[in-house]
Image (spheres, grey):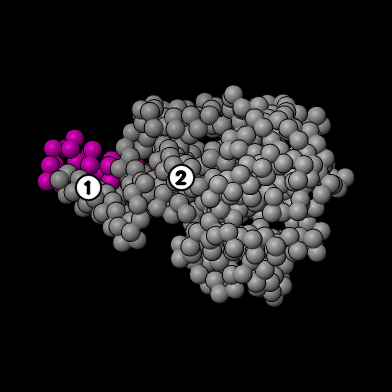
């Protein structure tokens, strides 16, 4: 269970969200610029809520563990939240091989465990042949697969995905998403995925949170929350 | 050619550069990764020697490290000798005087590293020390080299601070720039030509080596 409450301002943008996400997989849906990425960064502990920032409401609680509570001045560092995040930008470390990128967050494991975890993750994301490659030698889609493997390797409790499959074609994206959903379910990883693509949101059997101009407009099943988007897509397909 | 002064200049520049890198890397990382308004004051303080006349800085240090202040008296008791007019005193003065030349390239280099990479490292549990060692330093390699070369050359040619704080003691504080000054004062222009040529040659060679290294790696000039 992920409970979150934010009232955060940055220049003209105002994000005001309060909800509890109980589903294993939640899609944050909304047009560009509506605060999806900011919301994920707040959940990851990367934005606003750090020490030295002006006081505002920020509270994140995962399975009863408080990760951020601005009222109490509590802020768990990003690396200690058991939270991983993958964004559109793969952000692979350019001077490290694929192997070293994925192993970066596995410092506490011994060499053998680290190596087997890297192999397991590469297999999961369908990138087994890339282990010794450098990031500059990867295509956009390969880089996103590796970034996903790197994020999953430390076995997070909360996985945040910010349009992470934008460089993959539809079929590859669907296949990877299905494997990822199965893995997340097996490993009890709660996932929050931001997207502005209605087909992505509808394809995943998930809870959908509709975000409009920094406010939570609706929260429920994809069929209910995205009924209008569904109609719009059906009309568009019908006109082809 | 005053080989004693030449060796002392090289020793001073080497020791100063080593200390500066040890100080400037964490300082630059703090300025780039840290949060808070006090960091602006810290950056201004670290840049101050750039705009301060060297003789003024030398005078302040001479007073601070001398017997007129409690700090200076404490240092004298601790070391058994005053820092002023000694090689150690020159090192202290040079480190402060050349600090901006080490910090500024590093701040620029660290700040140019993609923030998304730093975020990724933070999410993967990297401490600040690990972020600097495994990410910022390797990715800002050229800035590290630039900081080292600038610090070395700036120390090699420094005059005002050296004269104020160290005076002109052969083997202890007489550097090449002091030798050059003495040669000009004595109208020995032939010797002054040679000393100036050595200082110029050292600077030019070091800069050419840095730029050649950058071009060989095919790195951008940013």
Q: Residues within 10 Å of mark 2 (few under 14, many from 20)?
A: some
**Is A225 on the left-hand or right-hand side of B193?**
right
- From the image, tell me which residue sits under label 2: B112
Residue A91, compared with residue A135, is above or below; it is above
Q: Is residue A104 magenta?
A: no
Residue A211, compared with residue A136, is above or below; it is above
Give the mark nearer the N terminus: 1 vs 2. 2
Residue B167, compared with residue A101, is above or below; it is above
Residue at 64 percent of width and 50 percent of height: A199
The image position of residue A87, as x and y in percent, is 60, 50
Q: Which residues are magenta?
A: B169-191
User: Along the line of sight, which residue is nearer the eye, A49 or A126?
Assistant: A126
**Is B197 on the left-hand or right-hand side of B72?**
left
Judge whether residue A57 can be spotted in this image.
Answer: yes
The image position of residue A204, as x and y in percent, is 72, 54
**Is A197 on the left-hand or right-hand side of A64?**
left
- From the image, tell me which residue sits under label 1: B200
Q: Residues under labels 1 and 2: Cα distance?
A: 31 Å
Q: Secondary structure at mark 1?
A: helix
Which subunit holds the residue at mark 1?
B
The image position of residue A106, as x and y in percent, is 68, 63
The image position of residue A63, as x and y in percent, is 86, 48
Q: Secondary structure at mark 2?
A: loop
Quadrant of res B62: top left
């Amino acid at each position: 269970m992920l409970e979150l409450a934010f009232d955060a301002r940055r220049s003209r943008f105002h994000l005001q969200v309060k909800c509890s996400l109980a589903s294993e997989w939640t899609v944050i849906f909304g047009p560009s610029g509506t605060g999806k990425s900011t919301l994920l960064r707040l959940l990851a502990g990367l934005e606003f809520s750090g020490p030295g920032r002006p006081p505002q409401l920020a509270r994140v609680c995962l399975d009863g563990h408080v990760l951020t509570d601005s009222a109490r001045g509590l802020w768990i560092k990003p690396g200690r939240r058991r939270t991983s995040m993958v964004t559109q930008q793969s952000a692979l470390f350019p001077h490290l091989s694929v192997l070293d990128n994925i192993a970066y967050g596995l410092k506490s494991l011994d060499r053998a465990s680290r190596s087997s975890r890297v192999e397991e993750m590469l297999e999961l994301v369908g990138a087994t042949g890339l282990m010794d490659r450098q990031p500059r030698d990867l295509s956009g889609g390969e880089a996103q697969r590796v970034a996903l493997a790197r994020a999953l390797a430390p076995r997070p409790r909360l996985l945040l995905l910010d349009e992470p499959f934008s460089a993959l074609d539809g079929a590859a994206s669907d296949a990877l998403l299905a494997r990822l959903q199965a893995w997340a379910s097996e490993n009890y990883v709660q996932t929050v995925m931001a997207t502005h693509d209605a087909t992505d949101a509808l394809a995943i059997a998930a809870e959908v949170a509709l975000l409009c101009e920094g406010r939570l407009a609706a929260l429920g099943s994809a069929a209910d929350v995205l009924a209008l988007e569904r109609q719009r897509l059906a009309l568009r397909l019908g006109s082809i | 050619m005053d080989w004693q002064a030449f060796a002392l200049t090289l020793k001073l520049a080497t020791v100063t550069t080593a200390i500066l890198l040890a100080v400037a890397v964490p300082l630059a990382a703090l300025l780039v990764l840290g949060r808070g308004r006090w960091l602006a004051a810290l950056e201004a303080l670290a840049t101050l020697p750039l705009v301060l006349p060297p003789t003024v800085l030398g005078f302040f240090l001479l007073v601070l490290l001398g017997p007129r202040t409690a700090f200076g008296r404490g240092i004298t008791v601790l070391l058994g000798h005053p820092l002023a007019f000694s090689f150690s005193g020159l090192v202290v003065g040079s480190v402060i005087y050349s600090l901006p030349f080490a910090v500024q390239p590093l701040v620029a280099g660290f700040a140019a590293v993609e923030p998304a990479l730093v975020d990724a490292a933070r999410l993967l549990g990297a401490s600040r020390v690990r972020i600097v060692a495994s990410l910022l330093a390797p990715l800002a390699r050229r800035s590290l080299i630039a900081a080292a070369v600038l610090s070395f050359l700036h120390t090699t040619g420094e005059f005002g601070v050296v004269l104020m704080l160290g005076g002109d003691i052969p083997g202890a504080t007489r550097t090449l720039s002091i030798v050059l000054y003495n040669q000009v004062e004595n109208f020995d222009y032939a010797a002054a030509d040679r000393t100036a040529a050595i200082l110029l040659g050292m600077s030019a060679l070091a800069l050419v080596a840095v730029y050649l290294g950058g071009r060989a790696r095919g790195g951008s000039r940013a």
